[in-house]
């Protein structure tokens, strides 16, 4: 069995090393004996993304987003077909905005998205910057998710697209309605850099499981010893509690510690 991950625009959309998400998925699959191929998809390539089990698109500055948007329009149909055939999409921040209808920048430029998510984004007066803690349902108990946000855009979800997470700390989609990210079927968008999956190993496995469903096999693969990841998460909880002067929240269950 081979898992194919498509990395969209790795040179243009890689704010805060979002490519780490691809590395994490690759590693966690390989550690379980699953073969992985990472396909790089750059502007101008004629790659058919229907061959990918999962697509990852990182974040970027407004200028890079404009460049990507032009190319992405040509891929719209191909990406839509891939999703209809079961491909999972994970998009971070600027990439997330481009999955929606449009992103209107602070200078008034309207960058078109591909409408995979029923959402639109408009730049606000102040950027939302800082560490985020959110809660995300992973088919069961809520999982605490850590990430970092830095965006001018405020995203608003329309009917037909659900928020992916609820913000506990930080701005999230728009700083006002408590939502973070968006989910429509197998398409996921979030403002969380980090890289997201390095800080949230159970979320990484959950996405891997979804992507592997396309192979006729889902999650349920052997658990890994996430000693360093858990230590990093505990450190984050303590640090955020210090910053907020609040009680240490529960970090979620699972993960074996040595
Ligand atoms: N971090 C990002 O990807 C930024 C996205 C976009 N340029 C914004 O400022 O909202």
Image (cartoon, grey):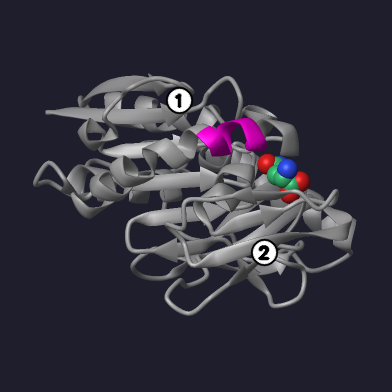
State the residue at coordinates (35%, 51%): 206
Magenta span dominant secondary structure:
helix
Farthest residue toward the left? Answer: 216
Q: Residues within 10 Å of mark 1 (few under 14, many from 20)?
A: some
In the rendered image, residue 96 lying in the magenta stretch gets the answer no
Q: Position of residue 43 (x, y in %)?
A: 49, 23
Give the left or right position of residue 110, taking residue 204 as reference: right
The quarter of the picture where residue 69 lies is top right
As helix, strand or loop, the secondary structure at mark 2 comes to loop
Above or below, comparing residue 111 to residue 53 in the picture:
below
Left or right for 174, reference 203 = right
Label of residue 23 in the image:
1
Point out the stretch of residues depicted in magenta: 65-70
Query: Is 236 displayed left or right of 130 in the figure?
Result: left
Which is more foreground, mark 2 or mark 1?
2
Q: What separation in Å lies between label 2 and label 1 (alpha carbons)?
A: 26 Å
Residue 13 in picture, x, y percent from top left = 60, 30
Res 28 visible? yes
Label 1 element class: helix
- Depicted 133 relative to depicted 228: above or below: below
At 61% across and 64% down in the image, what residue appears? 120
Where is mark 2, residue-wise? 173
Q: Quadrant of the N terminus?
A: top left
145 and 89: which is toward the camera: 89
């Amino acid at each position: 069995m081979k898992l194919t991950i498509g990395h969209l625009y790795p040179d243009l959309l890689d704010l805060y090393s979002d490519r780490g998400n691809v590395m994490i998925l690759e590693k966690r699959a390989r550690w379980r004996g699953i073969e992985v191929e990472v396909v790089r998809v750059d502007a101008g390539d004629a790659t058919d993304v229907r061959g990918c089990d999962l697509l990852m698109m990182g974040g970027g500055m407004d200028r890079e987003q404009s460049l990507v948007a032009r190319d992405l329009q040509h891929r719209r149909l191909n990406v839509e077909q891939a999703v209809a055939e079961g491909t999972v999409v994970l998009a971070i921040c600027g990439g997330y905005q481009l999955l929606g209808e449009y992103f209107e920048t602070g200078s008034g430029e309207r960058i078109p998205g591909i409408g995979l998510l029923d959402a639109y984004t408009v730049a606000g007066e102040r950027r939302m910057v800082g560490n985020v803690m959110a809660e995300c349902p992973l088919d069961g108990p809520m999982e605490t998710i850590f990430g970092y946000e830095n965006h001018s855009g405020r995203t608003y979800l329309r009917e037909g697209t659900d928020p992916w997470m609820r913000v506990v700390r930080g701005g999230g989609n728009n700083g006002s309605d408590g939502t973070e990210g968006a989910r429509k079927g197998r398409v996921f968008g979030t403002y969380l850099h980090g890289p997201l999956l390095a800080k949230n190993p159970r979320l990484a496995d959950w996405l891997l499981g979804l992507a592997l469903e396309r192979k006729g096999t889902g999650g349920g693969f052997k658990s890994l010893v996430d000693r360093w990841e858990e230590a990093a998460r505990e450190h984050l909880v303590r640090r955020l509690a210090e910053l907020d002067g609040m009680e240490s929240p529960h970090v979620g269950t699972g993960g074996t510690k040595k």
